[in-house]
Amino acid sequence: MACPLCKGNTVSGTTILPFEMKNGKVIVVLNVPARICNQCGEEYVDMKVARKVEQLLDRVERDGLMMGFVEYGDAA
Ligand SMILES: [Zn+2]
């Protein structure tokens, strides 16, 4: 896939996504699979992955987890 911003090449990698929850707590999801532009550094997470991250955040909220970091791999 070409980067929509600069038309550079994207490569497979992982990224870190921070989310602010309703209670003001910040959850950081580690090791999220992403395509990363090797020209401008922009990161793209596909819909399938984004949905999984949402499910993971739902579960984190339900569990009342107070930890700020979760691994993307825990959603699988
Ligand atoms: Zn780019």
Image (cartoon, rainbow, N blue to C red):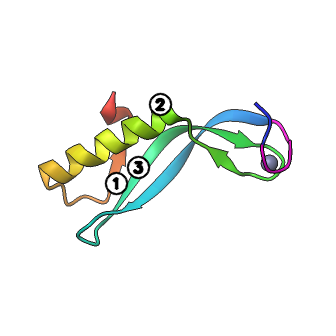
* Mark 2 CB near ligand 1 (8 Å cut): no
Q: Nearer the viewer, residue 41 or 52?
A: 52
- Dot 3 or dot 2, earlier in sequence: 3
Mark 3 vs mark 2, foreground winner is 2
Hey, what amino acid is under mark 3?
Answer: Val
* Secondary structure category for the residue under label 3: strand
Question: Is residue 72 at least partly visible in the picture?
Answer: no
Location of mark 3 (residue): 29
> Looking at numbered disc 1 in the image, what kind of residue is underneath it?
Phe
- How far separated are the C-alphas under marks 1 and 3? 6 Å
Q: In the rendered view of the protein, which quadrant contains the N terminus?
A: top right
Residue at 44 percent across and 59 percent down: it is 18
* Mark 1 vs 3: CB contact within 8 A: yes
Left or right: 1 as drawn, with respect to 49: right
Residue bearing mark 1? 69
What's the magenta bit mostly, secondary-structure-wise? Answer: loop
- The residue located at (30%, 63%) in the rendering is 21
| Image position of 76 with respect to 44: above or below | above
Amino acid tagged 2: Lys
Is residue 70 or residue 61 the one in the foreground?
61
- Chain part drawn in magenta: 4-9
Image height of 40 relative to 33, above or below: below
